[in-house]
Every structure is written in structure tokens, then in C-alpha cells.
Image: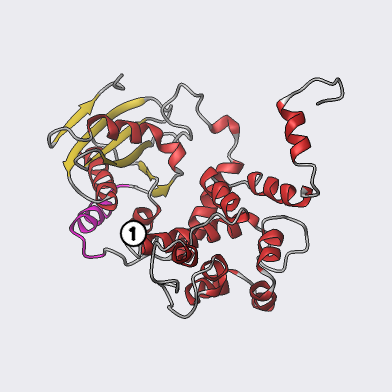
Amino acid sequence: MGGNRLFSTSSAYRSITRDGSSSSNGLWNVSWRLNVLQRVRVFFWLLLHNKLLTNVERNCCHLTDVATCLVCGLGDETVDHVLRGCGCARRIWTNLVRNDRLQPFLSMPFTEWITVNIQDTGKMVSLEPVRPRLFSITCWVLWKRMCCLVLGSDSNCYGDVISFCRLFWDEVVSASSRNASNVRPRTGMCRLLPPRGWVKVNADGAVGGSPVMAASSGVICDEAGEWLLGFVHSIGSCSILCVELWAAFDSLSLAWQRGFRKVIIELDNMQVVLILNGETSALGDNFLVVRIKVLLVRQWDVPVRHIVREANKVADGLARLVRGEPIGEWFYDIPPL
């Protein structure tokens, strides 16, 4: 009960947690206060609660006969191994951590390693300058990459992991520091307005349904954030990476056909952004990648940028409108209801 002798949910919670675990609760609170995407916070919450399903845990539950790491094969796949013990992880940290701080960074106890690096305590021995966001994003990417392998997805699903981490971190920092005066009110179509004389294209793809079908979409907005044109392309059956490439190709083709020559295209798939910006050689001979790069070298200005998924909901919602419909294209001069 509270001080007034009345029962409340908060007083019950305080009573239950009054067991000397305040330090653990404080650490969990730190994970929720990380200035990163919600999915990264959830990952660290699961990590701190020992809820991540590694091969060691799956083997104990008789879900697999293999407990070793699928990347290096040199040790059991524990969380510690995935995030810093595996040779792939060590190569990534070597590129991100100063040489004089690398050895203590890799050798400290695992719990302390997590605790110190997600808190800006001034005692960090890792990244310089202190960047808990970069640390947390890198850990999340390493875990997601392992999940791709275990689940049989594309093992190169994040291409160059170091470039992915830096680009993703730059995007988070940029989103955190944007001036509120440059953000469109909630009723607008674009959150960050393009410069005067430019248009912005938000492109996305969606895969799902039964049977599994895919659709690409794009929304073109002017410098005031107003809707100029939208489209949806029902493609049929293809992978998520393929439909994201279709979204980029269809959006760029439409923008060129409508006479726009200063175009910012934004996508929420980091691998596609890295491919189109030439920062990874993955899928270099894919026919869609070749066709997109032919478009990009035409006489126009087309920066390709990454945005977080939460900022691309309009294009995503548009793609879901016709997913599962017969193959074809639909164009919208006004936003569909």
C-alpha cells in the first residue's frame, strides 16, 4: 500500500521489487533510455534479461544439434561469443575502437563490458569519443547478422557491417539533432522537407500474405511536403530485398518520366542504400541494381539516403494496399483513403 494505506499498482510494484535488485533495475532503465531505435532498446532489454536464444540455448532445448558458432565454428555460440568473441565481431570492433583501448575493451568481463559501454559514465575504455549509440547499434547488427545465418536468410543481409553500423549511427544522430523548425507538422506527408527546388521520393516494399506476395510503392512530395504523386506496383512473389530494389527502380523511373531533376530518394533498407551508393559490392550483377545505376548516372541530382522504418510509414502503408492483388501498377494523384 501507499503512504495513505490505499492499494495501487505502483505501490505493489515497489513492494515486489524491494529486494536489493535496484542496481539491475537501474541498468535496465539505462537500456530503455538509450537514444536509439526501439528495436535496439528491446534487444538490450532481452540481452540484460538473458533472453536471447543462442545456439547454446537452442541446443539445451533440443532445438538444434549444433551449439557452435555458424560464422567461425571455433567456439560455442553464446551471446558473448556473438558480440565480441567471434572472429567477425573482433574484426569489426578492431575497426571501431582505438588500438590503445582495444585489449581492455575485449578482455573485460562480459556484464561489465555491456554495463560500461551503454552508459556515458566517463570511464569507458572503448569508443573515442564516447558513443553508447554506436556501441549499441553495432551489437544489435552483429546479433541480427547471426540471426540471418541461423534462420537461413541471406548471410550477407547487411553487406559491409562496418559501413552499415556507421551509416545507421549517422542517421540516428542526424534524426536526434534535427531542428524542429525543419520538420513538417503531423498532417504533412514529409517529416524532413527537401530543399527549395527539390522533390523527395519515399520508396518502400512489402512482402506478406498467403500466398506470399510482394508490392513496391513510392510517394513524391514537393518542397512544402505536399503530395505530388504516389504509385503502387504489385509484383508477385519475390524476396524482401528484391521488392526494395523494385521500389527504388520504380520510384526513380517515375521521377525521371515526370521531369524532376533534383530528387532525394529515401529508403529504409540499409543494404539497398549501401548498394546504390557503391559502398558494397553485393548484388553488383543483379539486373535491377544494374538498371538502377544506369538511371542514377543520368543528368540529374539524385542523392540516395537511408531513413528509419518509422519515418517511412506512408510508403509502407501504400505498398500494403495492393499486396496480393493481380500484377499491375496503380497511380494516385491524391492520397488514397
Q: Is residue 248 left or right of residue 42?
A: left
Please provide percent x and percent y for residue 305: 41, 48
Residue 22 visible, this angle: yes
Q: Please, is residue 320 above or below residue 70 in the view?
A: above
Please provide percent x and percent y for residue 135: 60, 60
Q: Quarter of the image holding residue 149?
A: bottom left
The residue closer to the viewer here, 149 or 182, is 149
The residue closer to the viewer here, 89 or 6, is 6
Q: Secondary structure at mark 1?
A: helix
Tell me the residue at 45%/61% (across/down): 61
Tell me the residue at 57%/68% (across/down): 80
**Which residue is under mark 1?**
275
The segment highlighted magenta reads: 284-300
The residue closer to the viewer here, 223 or 4, is 4
Magenta-colored stretch includes residue 289: yes
Q: Is residue 299 left or right of residue 134?
A: left
**Dividing the image into 4 quarters, which one contains the N terminus?**
top right
Residue 279 visible, this angle: no
Q: Residues within 10 Å of mark 1 (few under 14, many from 20)?
A: some
**Dividing the image into 4 quarters, which one contains the C terminus?**
top left
